[in-house]
Image (cartoon, rainbow, N blue to C red):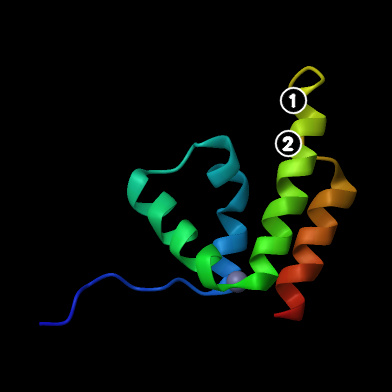
Amino acid sequence: MTESKRVIPCTEAVRQLWDYLDDAISPEDHDKVERHLSFCRKCCGELEFGQEIREFLGSKTSQEIPPEVKARLERFVEEL
Ligand SMILES: [Zn+2]
């Protein structure tokens, strides 16, 4: 019997990365992102980057993600 667990593509993982870092996604999606990150080095780099940004933002009052950060993520997705 084949399991229904599917591995999400990089684009989807990156799209959910912020929610993942914010713990704002369902446990199911959290698992999917985690599973992807466990084998994808590219997205792991992005995760570290995201964590740094979150720490930066967390040290201030809650803010929007800076446009340049969003632009970087968008470019990252385009390069996939
Ligand atoms: Zn990936």
Q: Which mark is residue 72?
A: none
Residue with the mark numbered 2: 54
Q: Which residue ends up furthest to the top in the rendered image?
A: 61
Q: Which element type, helix, strand or loop, lies under badge 2? A: helix
Q: Residue at x 74, y 25 (%)?
A: 58
Q: CA distance from mark 1 to mark 2?
A: 6 Å
Could you tell me if the residues under marks 1 and 2 are in contact, i.e. CB atoms within 8 Å? yes
Disc 2 under 8 Å from ligand 1? The reply is no
Quadrant of the image occupied by residue 11: bottom right
- The kind of secondary structure element at disc 1 is helix
Q: Position of residue 78 (x, y in %)?
A: 74, 76
Q: x%, y% of residue 27?
A: 35, 45
* Vertical comparison of 59 with 47: above or below: above
- Quarter of the picture containing the C terminus is bottom right
Residue beneath label 1, please? 58
Give whichever of 52, 11 is nearer the camera. Answer: 52
Position of 50 compared to 66: left or right?
left
Compared to 48, does 60 lie above or below?
Answer: above
Decide: few, some or many residues near mark 2? Use Cα within 10 Å; few <14, some 14-19, many ≥20.
some
The residue under the point 86% across, 46% down is 67
The amino acid at mark 2 is: Arg
Q: Residue at x 62, y 61 (%)?
A: 14
Answer left or right for 52 relative to 23. Answer: right
Q: Quadrant where the N terminus lies?
A: bottom left
Q: In this rendering, would 2 be left or right of 70?
A: left
- Residue type pointed to by label 1: Gly
Q: In which quarter of the view is residue 37 placed?
A: bottom right
Q: In which quadrant of this rendering is ligand 1 seen?
A: bottom right
Residue at the spot 19% in from the left edge and 75% down from the top edge: 3
User: Which percent across, then down, holds residue 64?
Assistant: 77, 33
Residue 20 in the image: x percent, y percent?
Answer: 54, 46
